[in-house]
Image (cartoon, rainbow, N blue to C red):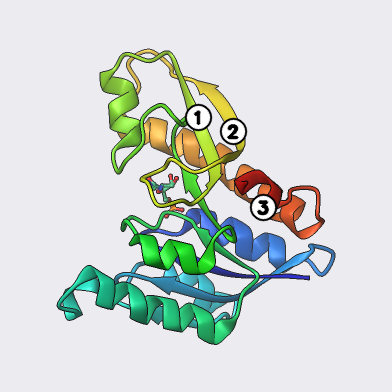
Amino acid sequence: MLSIVVLISGSGSNLRALLEACDNPLFPAKILAVGADNPAAGLAHAEQFGVPTFVVEPGLFDSRENWAEVLLRNLEYHKPDLVVLAGFMKVLPAGFVAALSPNIINLHPSLLPAFPGAHAVRDALSAGADATGATVHIVDAGVDTGPILAQREIAIPTGISESDLHEQIKTIERSLIVEVVSQIAEGKLNLSERSS
Ligand code: GAR
C-alpha cells in the first residue's frame, strides 16, 4: 500500500478525487495527511474523510527556506512514500525537493513543457493554442520542468473563458492523477527510473 501526503493551496477538487479513490479498499494507495500553505477551502475534503491536515503559512516565517523546512518536518512526521502536489501554488526551494526526490509529483494544467508557471490556462488562451491538457511530472529544482509521467490532451473550444477551460482541464486532471498514483502504487511507474 503506497502512503501519500497531498499538498494543496485551493479548492482541492483533485485532492477530493484522490480521497474518493483511496476510500475504495481495493485502491493500492492511502492518504496519511493533507497539507496546505494557507487555510485552503480544500482542507474540508480531508476533514470529511477523517484525514489529518496541517497548514504552514509562508507569511509566518522570515525566509522561504525556513518555511520550507517546517513544511518538510510536517511531511517527515507522516513518513509518506509519495508527496503529491495537487494545486499547490508555491514554488519549493531546491533543498526541500532534494530531500524528497524522486518521490514528489506535481499536477499541472497544461501539456508541459508548454505553459509552465502559475497561469498555465490563461497563457494557453493568450497564445491562441488550439489544444492544451494536463501533465503529471516528477518535481525537480525547476518550475514545472521535471520528468513527465503522464499527459492528457483536450481541444480548446473557440471563445471559451479561462475559468470554463480550467474546469474542463480539471475534469481530466482528476482521472489522470488517480491513474498515475495507482500506477506508482502498483509498480507500473518507477519514479527512480524515470528521474535518472
Ligand atoms: C489544478 O488545475 C492544478 O493543475 C493547478 O491548480 C489546480 C488546482 O485545482 N496547479 C497548478 O497550476 C500548479 N502550477 P483544485 O484545487 O481544484 O484541485
Of mark 3 and mark 1, the one earlier in the sequence is 1
- Is the shortest distance between ligand 1 and the CB of mark 1 under 8 Å? no
Q: Regarding mark 3 in the picture, which secondary structure is present there?
A: helix
Give residue 133's mark: 1
Coordinates of residue 121 in the picture (x, y in percent): 35, 32
Whether residues under marks 1 and 2 lie with C-beta atoms below 8 angstroms apart, the answer is yes
Q: Amino acid at mark 1?
A: Gly
Give the quadrant of the N terminus: bottom right
Q: Tell me which amino acid carries mark 3.
A: Leu
Please provide percent x and percent y for residue 66. Answer: 26, 78
Residue extending farthest to the front is: 196
> Which residue corresponds to the image point at 75% horizontal and 50% vertical from the top-left?
183
Indicate which disc, 2 or 3, sits on the residue closer to the N terminus: 2
Residue drawn at point x = 33 percent, y = 62 percent = 93
Q: Height in image: 49 above or below 110?
A: below
Q: In the structure shown, which secondary structural element does the residue marked by tag 1 occupy?
A: strand
Residue under label 3, please give it.
191
Contact? badges 3 and 1 (CB < 8 Å): no
Tell me the CA gap for discs 2 and 3: 16 Å
Q: Earlier in the sequence, mark 1 or mark 2?
A: 1
Residue position for label 2: 151
- Residue lying farthest to the bottom in this orientation: 77
Q: Residues within 10 Å of mark 2 (few under 14, many from 20)?
A: many
Q: Amino acid at mark 2?
A: Gln
Tag 3: Cα neighbours inside 10 Å, few (<14), some, or many (≥20)?
Answer: many
The quadrant where residue 159 appears: top left
**Residue at (46% x, 31% y) in the render:** 112
Can the viewer see residue 16 in this picture? yes
The quarter holding residue 68 reads bottom left
Q: CA distance from mark 3 to mark 1?
A: 22 Å
Judging depth in this view, the residue of 73 and 176 nearest the camera is 73
- Can you give x and y, in whole percent of width and height, for residue 190 in the image? 73, 51
